[in-house]
Image (tube, rainbow, N blue to C red):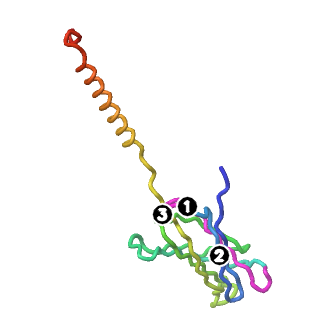
C-alpha cells in the first residue's frame, strides 16, 4: 500500500494565530473516509498553540438538498497544537470546513474564543464503475447470430442428397 498524497496546506491568520488545514487523500472520494488535519501556530513566536479546544463543522455543498446540512466534531482537547478527524463526504462538490479554537474556559475565563477559520474541500464527481456484463452478453449474442447465419447458409448451399439422415 502506498502513502496517500496530502492536499496543499490552506491557512488563515487572525487574532495572532495562524490556523492551518490540509486533508488526505488530496482527492477525496464520495463515502470514503478523508482525514482532515488541523494545526494552530502563534503568529508572533512561530510555535504551536497548545492546550486548546478544537471544534470542526463541515457544511454542505451550496444547493444540495439532501441530509441535515452540517456535521460537527465538538470540543476536541488539543494538547500539542495538532489534531485530525476522519469524515466521509456524502456527495461531490466544494464543502466549507469551519475550524473554531477556544481556550479551556476553566483556565482562561468565560471568554475563551481564540479564532475561527474557514477552509474548503473539493470532492470531485465520480463516474460509476463500468459493468462489462452487458458488453459480454452482446458479443455472445452477435457471435451466435453470425455463427447461426453461416451454418444456415452452408446448409442451404449443400445438394439435397447431403441433407438425408
- The picture places residue 142, in percent across and down from the top left corner, at 33, 35
Real-space Cα separation, disc 1 to disc 3, in angstroms: 16 Å
Name the quadrant containing residue 18: bottom right
The relative height of residue 145 versus residue 133 in the rendered view (above or below) is above
Magenta span includes 36: yes
- The picture places residue 86, in percent across and down from the top left corner, at 58, 64
Identify the secondary structure beneath mark 2: strand
Q: How crowded is mark 1: few (under 14 residues within 10 Å), some or many (20 or more)?
A: some
Which numbered mark, 1 or 2, is in the foreground of this view? 2
Magenta span includes 106: no
Q: Which of 40 and 160 is in front in this view?
A: 160
Q: Residues within 10 Å of mark 2 (few under 14, many from 20)?
A: some
* Residue drawn 52% across the image and 63% down it: 88
The residue indicated by pointer 1 is 33
Q: Which of 54 and 156 is in front in this view?
A: 156
Q: Residues within 10 Å of mark 3 (few under 14, many from 20)?
A: few
- The picture places residue 136, in percent across and down from the top left corner, at 39, 38
Verify CB contact (< 8 Å) between mark 1 and mark 2: no
Tag of residue 10: 2
The relative height of residue 155 versus residue 22 in the rendered view (above or below) is above
Q: What stretch is highlighted in magenta?
A: 29-46
Tell me which label, 3 or 2, sits earlier in the chain.
2
* Residue drawn 35% across the image and 32% down it: 143
Q: Nearer the viewer, residue 41 or 148?
A: 148
The relative height of residue 73 versus residue 129 in the rendered view (above or below) is below
Tell me which label, 1 or 2, sits earlier in the chain.
2
Identify the secondary structure beneath mark 1: strand
Identify the secondary structure beneath mark 3: loop
Verify CB contact (< 8 Å) between mark 1 and mark 3: no
Real-space Cα separation, disc 1 to disc 2, in angstroms: 20 Å
The residue indicated by pointer 3 is 125
Real-space Cα separation, disc 3 to disc 2, in angstroms: 22 Å
Amino acid at each position: 500500500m502506498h502513502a496517500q498524497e496530502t492536499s496543499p496546506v490552506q491557512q488563515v491568520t487572525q487574532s495572532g494565530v495562524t490556523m492551518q488545514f490540509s486533508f488526505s487523500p488530496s482527492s477525496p472520494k464520495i463515502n470514503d473516509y478523508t482525514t482532515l488535519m488541523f494545526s494552530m501556530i502563534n503568529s508572533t513566536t512561530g510555535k504551536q498553540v497548545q492546550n486548546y479546544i478544537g471544534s470542526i463543522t463541515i457544511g454542505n455543498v451550496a444547493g444540495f438538498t439532501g441530509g441535515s446540512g452540517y456535521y460537527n466534531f465538538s470540543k476536541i482537547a488539543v494538547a500539542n497544537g495538532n489534531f485530525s478527524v476522519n469524515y466521509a463526504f456524502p456527495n461531490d462538490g466544494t464543502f466549507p470546513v469551519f475550524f473554531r479554537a477556544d481556550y479551556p474556559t476553566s483556565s482562561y475565563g468565560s471568554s475563551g474564543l481564540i479564532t475561527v477559520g474557514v477552509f474548503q474541500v473539493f470532492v470531485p464527481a465520480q463516474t460509476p464503475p463500468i459493468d462489462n456484463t452487458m458488453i459480454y452478453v452482446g458479443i455472445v449474442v452477435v457471435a451466435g447470430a453470425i455463427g447461426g447465419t453461416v451454418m444456415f447458409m452452408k446448409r442451404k448451399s449443400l445438394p439435397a442428397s447431403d441433407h438425408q439422415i
